[in-house]
Amino acid sequence: MKELEERILSEGRVLPGGVLKVDGFLNHRIDTALLYDMALEIGRLFEGCGVNKVLTVEASGIALASMAGFVMGCPMVFAKKSRTSNIAADVYTAQVASFTHGNVNTLMVSKSWLSAEDRVLIIDDFLATGAALIGLRDICAQAGAEVVGAAISIEKVFQGGGNRLRAEGMRIESLAKIASMTDSSLEFC
Amino acid sequence: MKELEERILSEGRVLPGGVLKVDGFLNHRIDTALLYDMALEIGRLFEGCGVNKVLTVEASGIALASMAGFVMGCPMVFAKKSRTSNIAADVYTAQVASFTHGNVNTLMVSKSWLSAEDRVLIIDDFLATGAALIGLRDICAQAGAEVVGAAISIEKVFQGGGNRLRAEGMRIESLAKIASMTDSSLEFC
């Protein structure tokens, strides 16, 4: 998606440790017009696939997933990251390591909001090692829900997670695919 | 807002400790069509007020704030709740106690994304004691930004935070205002 690639080139910053910082337009500060264009593109890519639920992870996936759910006419469910006093005990869970934060989170989705009737589109902001996608796919499997595919804002293709999951048969559409990234250069696929 | 009140009555649940659970349509699972209607209503309420930025707190405020920002044609900024490896050191901060979770969080907004040019609409899902609103108002004051007002999904009027802040001059528009709430009854204002 040209519009997103251009924003990454003009406003993204590569931090030490391979973190791509896009917090001026996708995270922390969100360009809501760009967000809507991205949601439209996701809707176009998965049109006719029978998606009836969008699934993401808090917090950085929520904005795009809710906009995409709106565009596609279906509800959005977000996995919560830690056990709070406000969530039911009756949950599907998966353990996920965060590349950016260097920790492990438990993802949780209430059994009330995911079922065998669901055809799920997973949405997330970044795809690197694929850990979050694998966790969400596992949660869908626990619910008996079908994963139609995944839509990602930015895939770091050089980290391999996306292509490993594609090889396993998952359809993954990334709006920007980064082939390589250093402090001084960034190349799209 | 009638549509929201009806959903609260039909699908909300009051948990022990005064927690109103709306996780089937506003939190955890989000009804994206309702979300859009709520954003339209917020846009209508604050039309002509010169809002150029929407501010909320992760994670539960993000969906509504990003949709409202889209409807109002302005970017959305969300305060982050804890220091991560992925946020700049140069931040405005405020301490906020969570009624629901019984803990204290530090809210942080990067100095890059809030300034004296901003006319800010604060958006949040719940208003009870007003702690989150006070924290966000404080962050805006640190930035020299003007708070035009606040838009809230559900105000627990009986907890008093909203009316205390209105008495201090803050414009607060709540889409549903709960006058009283027990395990067996829920009354709107």
Image (cartoon, coloured by chain):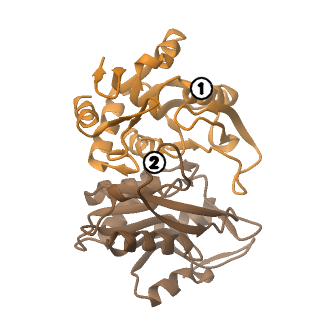
Chain colours: A brown, B orange
Local packing at callout 2 (Cα closer than 10 Å; few below 14, some 14-19, many 20+) is some
Q: Is residue A188 left or right of residue A42?
A: right
Which quadrant of the figure has residue B96? Answer: top right
Tell me residue B114's x, y (percent). 63, 37
Residue B50 visible in the displayed image: no
Q: Secondary structure at mark 2?
A: loop
Image mark 1: chain = B
- Residue drawn at point x = 38 percent, y = 53 percent: A66
**Disc on res. B137:** 1
- Spot the residue most to the bottom: A167
In this figure, what is the number of numbered marks?
2
Q: Position of residue B41 (x, y in %)?
A: 31, 32
Q: Residue B90's x, y, as percent?
A: 76, 44
Disc 2 residue type (three-letter): Ile
Instruction: For mark 2, name the chain.
Output: A
Instruction: Check the image and report above or below for A162 versus A42.
Output: below
